[in-house]
Amino acid sequence: MQHQASGAPADSARRGLGYGIAAYLLWGLFPIYLKALGALAPGEILAHRICWSLLLLGAMIFVAGRSRQLRAALGNRKVVLTLLATSLLIAVNWLVYIHAVVSGRLLAGSLGYYLNPLVSVLLGVVILKEKLSRGQAGALLLALAGIAVLAANAGGGLWISLTLAASFSLYGLLRKMAPVDPLTGLAIETAILAPLAVGYLLWRAGQGQSGFGVNGTTDLLLLFSGAVTAIPLLLFSAAAKRLRYSTVGILQFIAPSLQFLLAVFAFGEVLTRAHMICFAAIWAAVAIYAAEGLRISRTADAPGA
């Protein structure tokens, strides 16, 4: 019995690691899916993603028996107002990222998601009054230096990187503060955005500019946009429940690393000297941040700590 008890947490952690790697691999390879839809306007891709995600998430809530949690969340004014803000933030994040991929600026998108954890730390200091260690403060300063180099050399896609990092970090902060589970929260967010998405799609159809119904392959890809959105999020949620926070923090760099490789080696984006200096600074900052997180975590777990 002792062997089973000690093995259960290890088995859960192994499954969590598998879920986490799968989630970030899917997010990292997501640009390939978006490139296949590159003939469509970014707004149309986003609108379809919202509509098909809502249908899938609604079905998942019904099957999982989460209707009571959904009603409770909708009956809480603070939760609804928070999710109204997060829905706008995630819509901005999705739209800018889609624009980055289809316009050939995936490098800027990759940089944005490398910056995300560092911006989250900064928000924690400014808003939640969290304390930074010297290593974490040094990592932030190094990241800012890299951004300054890119900005000084007229990095045209810097606005993409900063918008992605800021919107997703604020999204994560607000979702952390909202007492609602990931599935229910995402369903409400997509429901809030759905009227705008449907209205936009109807307007494009009325203008004769709809990309749906023209090509069978494109239609199929759009129909799967709900699954492409929901599956990685659910895998991530399952991983987060089974893994240490520091482990999840390290895993999150899989996605932007894959995006970086795709941008340079698959999509042929130009890697300038300013890009190389900026990415080198961000990678070093990320390494310092991750190492410092592990050190702090081990110190906290040490006997007598």
Image: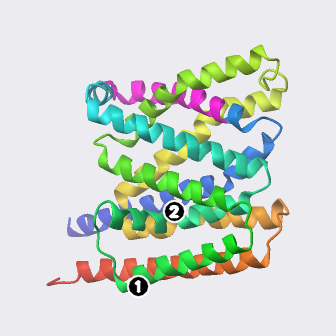
Name the residue tied to disc 2: 116
Q: Quadrant of the C terminus?
A: bottom left
Report the side of 295 relative to 119 (left or right). left
Report the side of 216 relative to 286 (left or right). right
Kind of element beneath mark 1: helix
Q: Is residue 22 visible in the rendered structure shown here?
A: no
- Most prominent secondary structure in the magenta stretch? helix
x and y percentages locating residue 163 in the rendered image: 58, 54
Instruction: Specify whether residue 156 is painted magenta.
Output: no
Residue in the foreground of this view, choosing between 258 and 238? 258
Report the side of 118 relative to 297 (left or right). right
x and y percentages locating residue 125 in the rendered image: 34, 67
Point out which mark residue 209 bears.
Answer: none
Q: Quadrant of residue 38?
A: top right
Magenta residues, start to end? 46-67
x and y percentages locating residue 139 in the rendered image: 48, 80
